[in-house]
Image: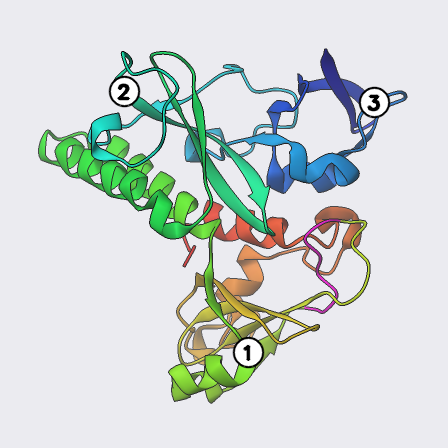
Amino acid sequence: MGEYALYEGQQVKIGTCEHMFGLRAAQLSQVTQAPGGINLDVARDALLFRFPFPDEDGTPPGHYRDCFRSLPLEFCHLDDTVYEHDRDDCTGPLALYLQRYWKDRLVTVIHCDGCGHMWRLPSLDDAQPVIDSLHAMAEVAATSGAEEYAVFLRSTADRVTAGYGTEYPSLRAFYDANPARLSGEAEYGVGWQIIATQDGPGWRVFYARDTGEVCAAFDGDGLVRVLGIVPADDPATDPDGRGRYFWTLDVILAGWGDRDVTGERLAWIIQRLGEAGRLA
């Protein structure tokens, strides 16, 4: 069954059943429910989203060319992992495939290129073999002179990592881990949500000057996630002459205060940091 949504007033196909091959998770705020279509906010946790491959940045929802794109992982094989498989005669190779939400994290989904079996990688530890494989592939590419492809692979690895985030159980734990974080802070709004229909407390996004960390703190229990790293600017270099130490971040997050642009979703912040190569 095809799934459709409205993008800029036009109906576009975004997937089939739970497979949203035409929609990144960060693009949820860019589409609205089509007549008779799926309610993406309600169904979000049951859906599989397109992995945000760096070379597809800027592609609108519903306009991706390869519906079932995946990236074979040359140094990550079934016999190197502990993932259960339903076919003993199939040995891979494994491929980076999709993302899905799991316990409010945007986790990686891989599949077997041989039979199509899929695995959700619920923790960063589970995803580490994928990340290691991508970096190993990047080293091979760089050594052979394919630096552009090496950059693509490293950025892809960063985007796998970013979905899991670096977390601290409270603001106190966050500051205790590195007192330099007690430097000046720039605020990027409150009430950011994992999904648009989320009720209750939201997330406060802020920037720590001396560490360059872009962070989100949950208003409910103080949980802190480090989303990205953007080194502070010399205030004297501010092109607007306003003396900002965060003008580069302002450029990266241009439009952050416009709810029609962001949908108030943290995924928008993560996508913009990823496009700038600044994920944590």
Amino acid on which disc 1 is placed: Ser
Q: Magenta segment: does it hold 239?
A: no
Residue 45, visible in the rendered structure: yes
Above or below 201: residue 48? above
Give the labeled residue for mark 2.
93
Image position, residue 13 (x, y; %): 70, 17
Q: Quadrant of the N terminus?
A: top right
The majority secondary structure of the magenta stretch comes to loop
Q: Are marks 1 and 2 in contact (CB under 8 Å)?
A: no
Pick whichever of labels 1 and 2 is earlier in the sequence. 2
Magenta stretch in the rendered image: 189-195
For marks 3 and 2, give the one nearer the viewer. 2
Q: Which residue shows up at 78% across the image and 54% down it? A: 198
Give the labeled residue for mark 3.
37
Residue 239, visible in the rendered structure: no
Q: Which residue shows up at 43% across the image and 35% down it? A: 54
Task: Look at the numbered disc 2 and give the secondary structure of its residue.
Answer: loop
Q: Which residue shows up at 17% across the image and 31% down it? A: 141
* Mark linked to residue 275: none
Residue in front for this viewpoint, 56 or 40: 40
Give the labeled residue for mark 1.
170
Q: Are marks 3 and 2 in contact (CB under 8 Å)?
A: no
Left or right for 129, reference 52: left
Image position, residue 152 (x, y; %): 32, 35
Image position, residue 14 (x, y; %): 67, 21
